[in-house]
Image: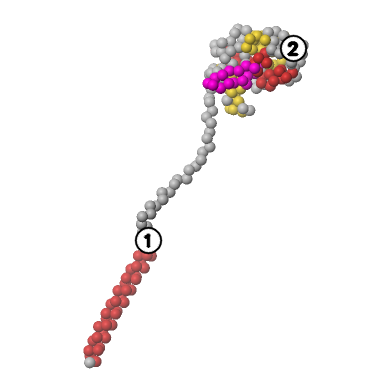
């Protein structure tokens, strides 16, 4: 009986040790797998739920206006001719545009009368000169008024911001347009908005480009200009 009991005991002990060894072996294997591959932890499987596709982040770019580029001698936005380009847009303009046609001959202003402020001669002063002449000389039907009242319509847009050019602006017009056969100019004198003295104002002869003076009460041609971008 004792001998039988000992045999059974040995059998159970052997079986138990084998199972324990198997358990330890499996545990060691699982531990090794997780330590070697830490990111292989299984996750629950989603069913019947499509994954949302990530939407790329949209960057808003401000709309930039495309600036029209003109060359000297080109037709301008108001239907005239571009005769001056200062290279960059500043103070609301880059180009000077000559009107497509002359104004009829008119006087510059009141003879023997000084207009306060209409003494600018350089490029960029004609507009203010024109305002000064209109405000400072009550004589009607003069060249400055005719230029300021002038308007054109081009591509359905009305342009009514014309003025009488200063001496240097008119000289640039002569060099860039008249001498190149552009603009339908006459071989005649043209008024500037630059005052000389109480009795006369500056003009340029478009036959030879000569800068001259005429009495203010002399009827002379004029060609309006405007600032453009």
Q: Is residue 19 within the magenta segment?
A: no
Judge whether residue 120 can be spotted in this image. Answer: no
* Numbered tag placed on residue 110 in the rendering: 2
Left or right: where 228 falls relative to 6: right
Residue appearing at x 38%, y 65% in the figure = 35
- For this rendering, which residue is in front, 93 or 88? 93
Q: Closer to the N terminus: mark 2 or mark 1?
A: 1
> Which quadrant does the C terminus fall into?
top right
Could you say whether the residue bearing mark 1 is in a helix, strand or loop? Answer: loop
Residue 88 coordinates in the image, percent (x, y): 58, 27
User: Alpha-carbon neighbours of circle 1 within 10 Å: few (<14), some, or many (≥20)?
Assistant: few
- For this rendering, which residue is in front, 82 or 153? 153
Residue 121 coordinates in the image, percent (x, y): 68, 18
Residue under label 1: 44
> Which quadrant does the N terminus fall into?
bottom left
Total number of numbered discs in the rendering = 2
Name which quarter of the figure residue 120 lies in.
top right
In space, the residues marked 2 and 1 are separated at their CA atoms by 98 Å
Name which quarter of the figure residue 131 lies in.
top right
Stretch of the chain drawn in magenta: 149-164
Could you say whether the residue bearing mark 2 is in a helix, strand or loop? Answer: loop
Left or right: where 19 falls relative to 82: left
* Numbered tag placed on residue 9 in the rendering: none
Residue 213 coordinates in the image, percent (x, y): 70, 10
């Amino acid at each position: 009986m004792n001998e039988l009991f000992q045999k059974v005991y040995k059998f159970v002990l052997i079986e138990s040790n084998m199972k324990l060894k198997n358990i330890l072996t499996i545990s060691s294997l699982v531990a090794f797998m997780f330590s070697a591959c830490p990111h292989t932890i299984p996750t629950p499987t989603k069913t019947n739920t499509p994954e949302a596709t990530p939407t790329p982040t949209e960057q808003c770019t401000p709309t930039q206006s495309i600036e029209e580029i003109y060359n000297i001698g080109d037709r301008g936005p108001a239907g005239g001719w571009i005769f001056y380009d200062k290279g960059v847009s500043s103070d609301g303009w880059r180009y000077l545009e000559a009107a497509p046609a002359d104004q009829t001959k008119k006087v510059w202003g009141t003879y023997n009368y000084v207009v306060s402020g209409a003494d600018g001669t350089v490029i960029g002063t004609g507009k203010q000169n024109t305002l000064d002449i209109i405000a400072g000389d009550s004589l009607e039907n003069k060249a400055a008024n005719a230029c300021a009242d002038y308007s054109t319509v081009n591509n359905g847009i009305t342009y009514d911001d014309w003025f009488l050019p200063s001496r240097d602006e008119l000289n640039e017009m002569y060099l860039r347009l008249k001498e190149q056969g552009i603009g339908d100019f006459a071989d005649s004198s043209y008024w500037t908005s630059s005052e000389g003295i109480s009795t006369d104002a500056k003009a340029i002869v478009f036959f030879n480009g000569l800068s001259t003076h005429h009495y203010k009460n002399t009827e002379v041609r004029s060609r309006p200009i405007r600032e453009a971008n």
